[in-house]
Amino acid sequence: MYYKQLNILLAVVVFSLSFFVHISRAEDCMHDAIYEKGWSAVVTTGVRIRDIPCMESSVVLATAPVGEVLHVIAETDGYYKIERKDGTVGWIGQWLVAKTNQSFVKDNAPKEPLFDIVNHPYGSAIRYLANKNIVQGYPDMSYKPDSTINRAEFTKIVAEAQFDPGDINDCVHNFSLPGLNYIAFPDIPLSAWFASYVCMAKDEGIIGGYPDGYFRPSNEVNFVEASKILVEVFGLDKKEGDYKEWYRPYVEALQNNSYIPKTIDNLDKKITRGEMAEMIWRIMEEEHTLPFSQLI
């Protein structure tokens, strides 16, 4: 009996510790010390370069293929801070690269802001939003129009397109509760760069979480999710009623106004930064004459 009780007690302790470690890692991401480095690494497994050394709540800046040589400039627990030859700086998992004697040669050619939207199908829409300070490029001057967009990024952009900056900035202060280190959803830390935007969108009833109550800011946005947010943010007319598919009135509202660009060819498609800009531009300018997708 004694050993049985001891085993049960140990099991509870182990479970509690594992739960604590999981929560601590989620909250303490980026809190480890960062050490300077200076050597070359070759990509052994295709990597996603992130803006912070963290899987959760990070933004994917770019991808690097197998064989590319990177410059390792710093490290923290499990991550290297790297630089690509085009100037992109970000974080990757240490297990995805190996040290190499190959030389890292940086491309020092100067780049214009948003240089990679030139001749892009949605370049005009991106430039339109950039001129209104609704979207920004990355530190390497790129916009990455064909990269997918996550829930945190998307929420930030639509919030900036519709709400007063002062109201957005005040939201966390106005709605945070004493003793809690998150806002709106358990996985939105008060210190997160996107906290104020999520707070504003949640307060306005524009966004909701998953059934378990979490927001999951790093999840990629698919078209039906984007359609609901856009219709709610910009107050587009939609048909009321009981629908079998929750997303139908939102998709129809965009489709009936020719706001769905042709590259969005299915309801579950992951939205790119370029497609997002195109839809917002069409809505803001009430552009109804361009080719569009019919998905319903």
Image: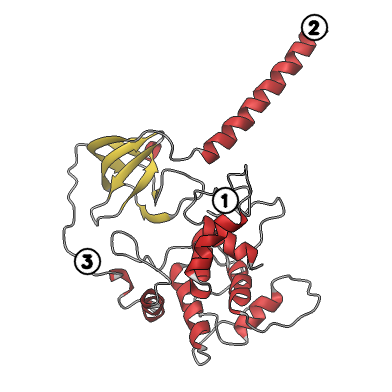
42 on left or right of 129: left
Question: Does label 1 or label 2 sit earlier along the sequence?
Answer: 2
**Residue in view at x 64 percent, y 64 percent:** 203
Describe the element under mark 2 as helix, strand or loop: helix
**Residue in view at x 53 percent, y 91 percent:** 288
**Residue 4 horizontal/vertical position (percent):** 79, 12
Describe the element under mark 1 as helix, strand or loop: loop
Q: Which residue is mark 3?
A: 111
Which mark, by number, is residue 169?
A: none
Q: Which residue is mark 2?
A: 2
Q: Which residue is mark 1?
A: 188
Marks 1/3 in contact by CB < 8 Å: the verdict is no
Q: Relative to 179, does residue 141 appear above or below in the rendering?
A: below
Q: Quadrant of residue 258?
A: bottom right
Question: Does label 2 or label 3 sit earlier along the sequence?
Answer: 2
Q: Is residue 220 visible?
A: no
Question: Does label 1 or label 3 sit earlier along the sequence?
Answer: 3
**Residue 205 horizontal/vertical position (percent):** 66, 67
Q: Relative to 119, does residue 142 appear above or below in the rendering?
A: above
